Amino acid sequence: MRVLLFTGKGGVGKTTLAAATAAHLAATGRKTLVVSTDPAHSLGDALGVPLDGDATELDQGLYGSQLDVRRLVDGSWESVRTHLRTLLAGAGVDDLAAEELTVLPGVEELLMLSEVYRLAAVGPWEVVVVDCGPTAETLRLLALPEALSGYLERLFPTHRRVVRGLLAGIAGARQVDRWDAAADALGRLAERLVALRAALADRSRTTVRLVTTPERVVMAETVRTLTALAVQGIHVDGLVANRLIPVFGPRRGLAATWLHTRRDEQQAVLASLAVDVPVWTVPHLAAEPTGVAALRELAAALYENVDPLGAGDADAVPLLTVSGGNGRYQLRIALPSIGEDIDLARVGDELALTLDGRRRLIPLPPLLRRCVVVGADADADGLLVHFEPDPALWPRFE
């Protein structure tokens, strides 16, 4: 099973290209579900059919769905909220405050992502193509499973035992039972988050395809997104440059001059692009491709003589590689298109990488936990962090 996530800056055509890719995959004999987590709800418009929360067969081997976030919240999250509200009410918190305290930011997006993988597991599809929201929303969405599961991991089981003892002393067994019910519900949520995070990090199962346009501002955001996803441990398998001005005849007249100028600018942007992923281009069409037939024509031009799912990622470079010896060690963090705007900090036994305000904690290998960071360099292959043994932990190096 393969899950292919499409994202990009708003307005670059990611929904159209996600739908076109799904239609093309179905035409080549692979049962495909295309599903939208984008609040804009434009997937049905691109396919030319209305969609709802149920997977509907649109054509031979092609299914579509627009996730119903309200139904997901009412069905999956409401039980957890009920347990928490009961617990807070028992602790003396009034109903209105308890209602507000149990609102978890990002839970709607998280439930939609979880539903995507549930559909991938239970359906007959070989591929699930996901039309995600714009890049900023998608980066936040893909970071949620790790962030929230890390929080819950720190909260349980230690805090559960502490709170249980506290409640036993002030409220009796009934309140302890309420806490246990809430803790069990949150524990199940934590298990789902761990599984979801593992699925996102599985390069053979999940990949992201970035959609952009050959414009400097848009491309700059795309390159930052590429690095940000690498920081999160999520693999980008390709970049699609949409709306490339086609080749025209001589530069005669204002219109022809304008078109040639725009194409030259676009070609200059593409020539300056230095990324380690495949780059496909899509021409700027005169008519908007709407409906399955038009989308298949678009995809045929995009993936001419190329498998839309790629050749796999067997030769992928590991995110972390340790080298060195005799008191000098290096940790290679494989990040594409790394720039000077990435921050690195040591936090206990972890390295904190921060890019554009997004942070990821990377656990250090056991050997390096007894070392101190003495420097870092960036090159074409990513980030190289230098370590030396900590004399307090390696007495022989004193």
Image (tube, grey):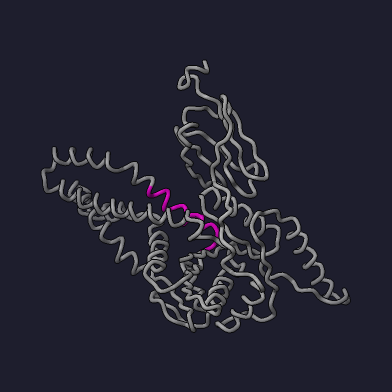
Q: For the point 15% across and 49% down, which residue is it?
A: 177
Residue 386: x percent and y percent?
Answer: 59, 31
Q: Is residue 299 above or below residue 203?
A: below
In x, y percent, where is residue 337? 65, 49
In-image side of 172 versus 103 (left or right): left
Q: Measured from the top left, where is residue 323 in percent x and y?
A: 57, 35
Q: Camera-side residue: 157 or 370? A: 370
Give the residues in magenta.
Answer: 133-149
In the rendered view, would you say 58 is above or below 241?
A: below
The residue at the point 35 percent across, 68 percent down is 70
> Observer-nearest residue: 367 or 263?
367
Q: Is residue 136 magenta?
A: yes
Q: Is residue 221 left or right of residue 113?
A: right
Asked whether residue 9 appears in the rendered view, the answer is: no
Quarter of the image where the N terminus is located: bottom left
Nearest the viewer among 203 and 119 is 203
Q: Is residue 345 magenta?
A: no
Instruction: Give the quadrant of residue 154.
Output: top left
What type of secondary structure mainly makes up the magenta span?
helix
Q: Seen in the image, is 255 located left or right of residue 27?
A: right
